[in-house]
Image (cartoon, rainbow, N blue to C red):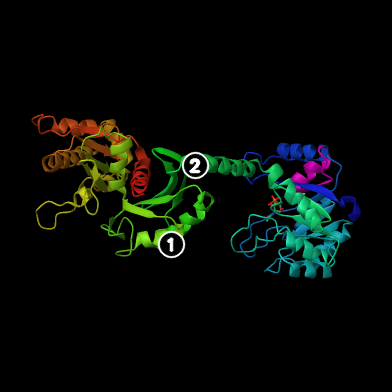
Amino acid sequence: MQRDDIQNSLIVSCQPVPDGPMDAADFVIGFARAAVDAGARALRIESVAYVKAVRAAVSVPIIGIVKRDLEESPVRITPFVADAEALADAGADIVAFDATDRVRPASIEALVKVVAAKGKLTMADCSSLEDARHALAAGVDFVGTTLSGYVGGPEPVDPNLSLIAEMRQLTPYVIAEGRIRTTEQAAAAVKAGAFAVVVGSAITRTEHVTSWFHEAVAKAYDAKSPGTVLAIDIGGTKTMAALVRGSDVLDEITVATAREEGPDAWLAAIADRVGIWKDRYSRVGIAVTGFVQDGRWSALNPATLAIPDQYPIIEKALAVFGKPVFAANDAQAAAWGEYSFGAGNGGDVVFLTISTGIGGGIVINGRPLAGLAGHFGLIRGPSEGSFPLEDQTSGRWIASEALKAGHKATAAEVFDLAEKGAPWAKAIVSQSVLRAATLCRDIQMMLDPDQIVVGGGIGLAKGYLDQMRKELAGIDSRLRPVLVPAKLGSRAGIIGVASLAAEQG
Ligand SMILES: CC(=O)N[C@H](C=O)[C@@H](O)[C@H](O)[C@H](O)COP(=O)(O)O
C-alpha cells in the first residue's frame, strides 16, 4: 500500500478489552467487517493471531500491533523486532510501535529497518512532539498521538488536539489517535491537521462505552435525588467502597487493604478507585476496625490492623475527598445499619458480630453509642491474665483449638465437621456457643435491649444461633435475650455509616 491510501480517512481500532467477553477472533472480525461496511478505510488490530484472522476477512489496510507487559521496560506496543516481523508476515500493511523515549528492548531504527525490509510501512506511537521528531529522523512513515497521556501521571479525558497540530508542523503524515470518543472530537482532529483519524474504544470496547453511559445515567439520577454518600469500610484484609443512598447500594468495589502501607496509602488507594464517582456523592462515611474518638482513629487490637495511634482520619479524608467526612467503628456502624434497615424493629438494639474477632454496637433510645461502646470482644474475666473474650470464642480461637486437638481446619471446616458429628469439633463449637450465649445474657442484664442482632461468619454459621438460644433456654423468659440473625450481611457497615454520615448534614 501507499501512504496516501489512508489519507483523509477514519481508521477503526478493533481491540477488545483484554480477556473480556469480547476478546475472541469472531468478535474482532465482526467489528472489522462492520467498520469497513460503514466507511472505515483501515483498521488497527492487536496481536498476530487477530491480524491473520482479520486479513482473511477484509481487504482494507491493517495497522498491526502486539501488546506486551514487560518487566524490564514500560514499552507495551510492539516492543520487539520479532513482533514487528511477525505482524508484517501475518498481513499487516503498517506496523505500529511505541516510539517513546523510555527504556526499550529494540531501537526505533531497528524496528523501521526490519519492517521496511518486508516492504511494509511504519507508524510511530508517540507521546510528545520530541518522540515524533526522533521517530521521523529514524525514518518512520507515520507519527501518531497514540501514547500522549499514557506515560505517567493521571490519564486525561480529552484527546490531545494541540499535539496533532504541533506534529503537523513536522510532517503531513500525522495520525490522530487516543481518546477520540465523539464525532465532534474526530472532526476537531481533522481540523487540527490529522492525515487520518483512529477511533477505538468508542466503537469497539463495549465495556468502556457502557461504563460511560452508566456513569452519566447514574449521575443524572443522583442529581435528581441527592443524599448519596460515599461509604467506605476499612477492614483488616479488605476495604469496601460504595455509593449508598438510604439502604440502596448503587455501586460497589472491594480492594485489598495493603496492611503494611498505613492509612494515608489506604485512603489514597480508595480515592484512586472511586475517582470516577466524584460528582455523585455529597458526603463521606468511613467505618473502621478499631475505635474513633474526636475524629481520631486508633487500634484496640493492633493485630487486626496496625493503625498509628490517634490518626486524624476526619481531617485526612476531608483533604483526600474534599467533602464532609464522618467516621465510626465498623460494628457500631453495622449496628446502626441493622437498627435502621435490617433486623431492628424500632426498639433498642445491640449488634454482635462474631467472626475473626468479636465486635459490637449499641443503639439505645434511637441513638448509636460511639467511642468505646460495644467492644464486647475485648472484655475479660476477672482472673489474672485471662484473655479477651474474642480470643476464647471467635473464628480465630476455633481454628486454633482445632489445631490443638490435632486437626488443621478453618473455623468453617470445624462447623462442617461438628454438623457431621465429629465429637472434637462439636466440643469446640459448644464451648464457643456457651461463651457467646453468656455474653448475650450479660448484655441483657446491662442494657436490656429489645433484641440482640447476631452477625458475622461464626454468628451466622448454620446452627450457631439456635445453639445459643438452647443454651439460654433455661433462663426466666423475662430476663432472656431475644436473639435474631443480622439481615444486611457484609453490607451492614457501609449502609450504617452512610446513614450516619447523611444525618450529619
Ligand atoms: C495507550 C494504548 O495502549 N493505546 C492502544 C493502542 O493501540 C489502544 O488501547 C487504544 O484503544 C487505541 O490507541 C485507540 O484509542 P482509543 O481507544 O482511546 O480510541
Could one spot residue 85 in this view of the protein? no
Check mark 2 vs ligand 1: CB closer than 8 Å? yes or no: no
Q: Position of residue 219 (x, y in %)?
A: 53, 43
Residue 49: image tag: none
Disc 1 element: helix
Please give the name of the residue rendered at 51% of the width and 56% of the height, measured from the top-left corner. 272
Q: Position of residue 464 (x, y in %)?
A: 25, 34
Query: In terms of sequence position, does the residue under pointer 1 or pointer 2 come before the other?
Result: 2
Left or right of residue 390, residue 438 in this image:
left
Kindly identify which residue carries mark 1: 319
Q: Position of residue 128 (x, y in %)?
A: 72, 66
Disc 2 element: helix
Q: Amino acid at mark 2?
A: Asp
Instruction: Please tell me how crowded label 1 is: few (under 14), some (14-19), or many (20+) other residues with Cα within 10 Å.
Output: few
Please give the name of the residue rendered at 42% of the width and 41% of the height, measured from the top-left corner. 245
Q: Amino acid at mark 1?
A: Ala
Residue 222: image tag: 2
Please give the name of the residue rendered at 35% of the width and 53% of the height, measured from the top-left corner. 326
> Which tag is nearer the camera, tag 1 or tag 2?
2
Q: Which residues are magenta?
A: 38-56
Q: Quadrant of residue 79?
A: bottom right
Check mark 1 vs ligand 1: CB closer than 8 Å? yes or no: no
Q: Position of residue 477 (x, y in %)?
A: 11, 29
Distance between mark 1 and mark 2 Cα atoms: 23 Å
Q: Is residue 137 magenta?
A: no
Could one spot residue 44 in this view of the protein? yes
User: Considering only vertical position in the picture, is 113 above or below 361?
Assistant: below
Instruction: Please tell me how crowded label 2 is: few (under 14), some (14-19), or many (20+) other residues with Cα within 10 Å.
Output: some
Left or right of residue 334, residue 110 in this image:
right
